[in-house]
Image (cartoon, rainbow, N blue to C red):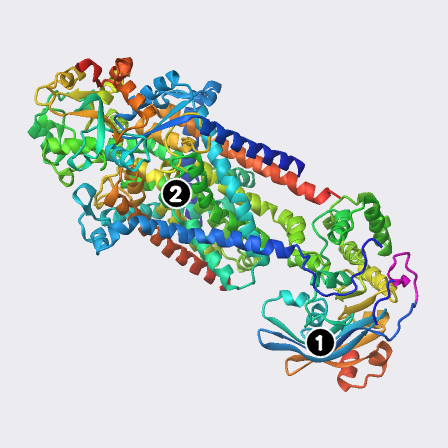
Amino acid sequence: MKKFKILLTTLICMMLFSQSSYAGSERLILTGSSTVAPLALEIGKRFEQLHAGVRVDVQTGGSTRGVLDARSGTADIGMASRALKGTEQDLTSHLIGMDGISIILHRNNPVKMLSNAQIIAIFTGKIRNWQQVGGENRSITVVNKAEGHSTLELFLHHFSLKNSQIKADVIIGDNQQGIKTVAGNPNAIGYVSIGTAEYEEAQGTAIKRLPMAGIAPTTEQVRLGKFPLSRPLNLITKGKPSSLAQSFIDFARSPAVRDLVEAQFFVAVASQH
Amino acid sequence: MIWSKPSSLLLLPRNIDRLWQPLLAGMAVLCAVLLLLIVAFLLKEAIPALHDGGWRSFFNDQSWYPLENMFGLLPMLWASLAIVSLALLLAAPLGLANALFVRFYAPSFLVTPYRLMLALLAGMPSVVYGLWGLTVIVPIIAAYHQPGTSVLAASLVLALMILPTVALTCLAALEAVPSSLHAGAAALGMSKQGLLLGVIVPAARYGIGAGMVLATARALGETMVVLMVAGNVVQTPHSIFDPVRALTANIALEMGYATDLHRAGLFTSGLILTLLVLVLAWFAARTMHKYQYA
Amino acid sequence: MTINNSTTAYTLGNMTLGQACCTPVPHLQIKKLSIAYAGNTVLDDVSLDIYKGCITALIGPSGCGKTSFLSSLNCLLALIPQASVTGHIYFDRDDIIHDAIDTMRLRRRIGMIFQKPNPFPLSIRRNLTLPLREHGVRNRYLLAEKVEQALKDVGLWDEVKDRLDGSALALSGGQQQRLCIARALVLEPEILLMDEPCSALDPIASGVVESLIKRLQGRYTVVIVTHNLAQARRVANYAAFFWMKERVGTLIEFGRCVNVFEHPRNPLTLAYVRGQAG
Amino acid sequence: MPERMFTLLIWGAALLVTGALLWLLADTVLQGVAHLSWAFIVDAPEHAGRDGGIGPILVSTLCILGVALLVSLPLGLGAAIWLAEFSRQGGFLGQIIRLSLDVLAGVPSIVYGLFGNAFFSLFLGFGFSILSGGLTLACMIIPVFIRSCEAGLSAIDHGWRHGALALGMSRSTAVWYILLPAAAPAIIAGLMLGIGRATAETAALIFTSGYVDRMPESWMDSGRALAVHIYDLSMNVTGGNAAAYASALVLVTLIVLLNVLAQAMTDRWVKRRIFSA
């Protein structure tokens, strides 16, 4: 009985202590795009080092979620891998980088190039074998994204497709899952963020990016504004952000994080000027 | 005298039970109210999708494309049912056979380790089954039929996952059969096979049945395994190699990203799942009821 | 009729053998008692006095409501859902059926021994100290003293004094039943209700318990249900004979043990005690 | 069907199942051990979990489990005691509560996740946090725990109950000193079932306790559970399989250890009940 009481007291003390430590520190909550999240996480870590007592929590949830959380106040800052839509003009976006969307194949797939028409035919199920586009005699595994991701929306918009037209074999959630799926299947075709794909390739993952409309899917082409399927990476706030959020946004847009942005293979805004 | 003898028996409000009873009753009611709370919150979140006859779209729409405001749940419902029934088709006979093995065939030195193994695997997290299915079963199926993630993969892993539970519940039901029945049948000169199939298994049928229903409920509610190995493509399955998305996987996959009507749609599928489980629980309770009075 | 606190009847001590006082003063008065389960009457219209310091045996065939009658005396019947009791049971001026009484206190004063020995799954010592603590005895020395005395009273002390902290469930059936009696005695009750206390025991253990019951006479008021007519005859001062009439149990005859067994007034009683019916 | 065929069939089924299960077990243990080290257990994850360890995740997992048990144990035990010892037999309230508990026990974990997200995270404003996750898990294990405890209490010989009451003991005393220790095996079984379910749970935690794989600093911080980490590594992280298997091994070992611990603690409790004077 005595031991139990001691245990209970300790627990309560721990709770009080942790509560007070929580109250003493400032916290920034970022939610939204899974494309921006890894970058925001890295920026957050550096930001924490510079600002003692600040904790930056990053949760993924898709661009639309980021927009809505910023609007509702659930998050201090939303993350979106797209521009704000017409219905979202009540919010403010802060550009922190640029990214593109690239078609990816398994590294061992001999196919070097696909035209837009071929891509559409593959994703709508009209072409079902790699032989039809100059590859080996294998059936194609189409990897599509789950609804709610801006990557999917941009891809569909670019090729003027509806999601219901796509005949997918596998549906994936995050960029990383798409890359893992394609890397594990020699017959797969998918599309992911260029930044994520370049990062993964640098890590030795067995994927390759395909040029689109003859333009190589690289950070360089996105920077030059030549790559057709490119998009802004934004931080979203409602009204005037808190001073902490403002300093985080300023920090994320400053040259101080340029190496982080480039390490994730995105185009840093600071370099555009 | 340490305590004085009560001069009267008249009630004094000293009884400690009077303190505990309402407290404990309150706890019990609180636990039960949880069900109401869950249903209420699911309904509250699902209302935007249900009102104005919106619920009809869940059954009338062709398929699930929230971006295009199509909320047909039927393909996923069929997928869930296909996966579960195939898994049960595999797990039920194998589980029963394993229970018979442990009870009547296994050499005595094997019985305890075998039971331990079953108990350990029954407690294995489903995400571990999913991980194993994703890295072992899916590539094997993919070698025969792309992409590997399919109804078959999900059913196989799910069957393996519920097998220990099925075997253990069947075993419990078999052990509940009185041994006098055993001796009686053996005295009639019945063969072991005749004894098991003709006497023991029928005598244990209600216990076995209830175990199966519980296993079905568990398989139907399982999320991680189907999310990881079924492929998650929304379509009505036409072959066991088709990748499909189950109702539970749909919630797990899209919940983090869903907003507005889409989110409401996911809560609706949660409601439908709960309803399915309710029916199964009622069924199991009825089976058990029969069992008690058989 | 009230209990005099100063009498020595309730102090513990080595019990003496042989006849002690058995005065025909009613300790419990039962008036027109009827018991029904879910509307089916099982015992109808029983009126009976239980005499102070005497052993009263309840005899009769199975199912005639003897056990129900016994459990109504300490309000244990109220635990069974749908059981209803009508009539009056007077104890210490209170009607325990109709007055708002503290059943916990009532049961401390009216102990009960069950057919199947039911020592708690605790140590032998704890079986005795737990009820004492519940009723406010906290002093360690006093507890130890009372435990020893109770065990000596039931003749168990020499058998278990070396293993008081061993599990009570390790005792033999007869020892368990004596422990249960000790557990009831340690609370210094006034009345002991015994529901076939020997029927689950072997003949030797049964003999030991029976002699123990006999020694309780004069110090406690005992009501004992038994199917063993010879035993009833050996231990009881009074006997009550119950019988089923049209599926409803009722009291046929009550009187001094000798009278009921030797010169019954009712032919049914005669047939039963002679072994011709029941 | 000849007798021998049937025997062969039974043995075949046993071998098949044992083979498959041992395959799974061996894979988990062998692949897990290959990546396992002390550093893996205490370090923080790096590169999305490819490198580094699972230290903060282990802490989050135990915190979530702690919250779940702290809430569900007293509540569940109290409810079970009321159902078994205080409620009127065949009473209306008792029946309703039992029925809803049966339904709750069958509700899929993902539905608990939906509820936890809507109720704890959003309605009560706990956000993605260890508190939300723990409370959601508590809701999930309470029905299983109650039913197990109640079954254990109901299976106890009525003689003890009557004996205690006939001695003028209160029901509360009888429950605390006699019935609970006697029902201890069933209570541990329920506890183990609950711990097993809570530790293994993934789906209900994704939307309640969240993904953050850093060391939690308060109950309101988001914390990634081990099961969620395994899911993330296997689905989202290229080259994460080795770490996933190592985490899986840690998770399974953790569940076994917690079971042993629960068993030992209950044993001690029962002994104290028997022997303290």
Question: How far apart are the alpha carbons under marks 2 and 1?
Answer: 57 Å
C13 over D39 or under it: above or below: below
Q: Position of residue C1 (x, y in %)?
A: 84, 72
Q: Is C7 covered by the magenta stretch?
A: yes
For the point 75% across and 55% down, which residue is it?
Answer: C173
Determine which quarter of the picture holds residue C48. bottom right
Q: Which image quarter holds the C terminus of chain C?
A: bottom right
**Closer-to-camera residue (C135/B13):** B13
> Looking at numbered disc 2 in the image, what kind of residue is underneath it?
Gly
The total of numbered circles placed on residues is: 2
The residue where tag 2 is placed is D116
The residue where tag 1 is placed is C88
A233 over B157 or under it: above or below: above
Q: Position of residue B89 (x, y in %)?
A: 34, 48
Work out whether disc 2 and disc 1 sit on a shared chain: no
Looking at the rendered structure, the secondary structure element under dot 2 is helix
Q: Is C10 covered by the magenta stretch?
A: yes
Q: Is residue B117 left or right of residue B139?
A: right
> Looking at numbered disc 1 in the image, what kind of residue is underneath it?
His
Q: Position of residue C248 (x, y in %)?
A: 65, 80
Q: Is residue B3 left or right of residue A126?
A: right
Q: Is residue D217 visible to us here? A: no
Determine which quarter of the picture holds residue A39. top left
Q: Is residue C251 left or right of residue B238?
A: right
Span highlighted in magenta in the image: C6-18
Determine which quarter of the picture holds residue B11. bottom right
Q: Given the image, what chain letter belongs to the residue carrying mark 1?
A: C
The crowding category of the residue bearing disc 1, from other C-alpha atoms within 10 Å (few below 14, some 14 to 19, many at least 20), is: many
Q: Is residue C90 left or right of residue B283?
A: right
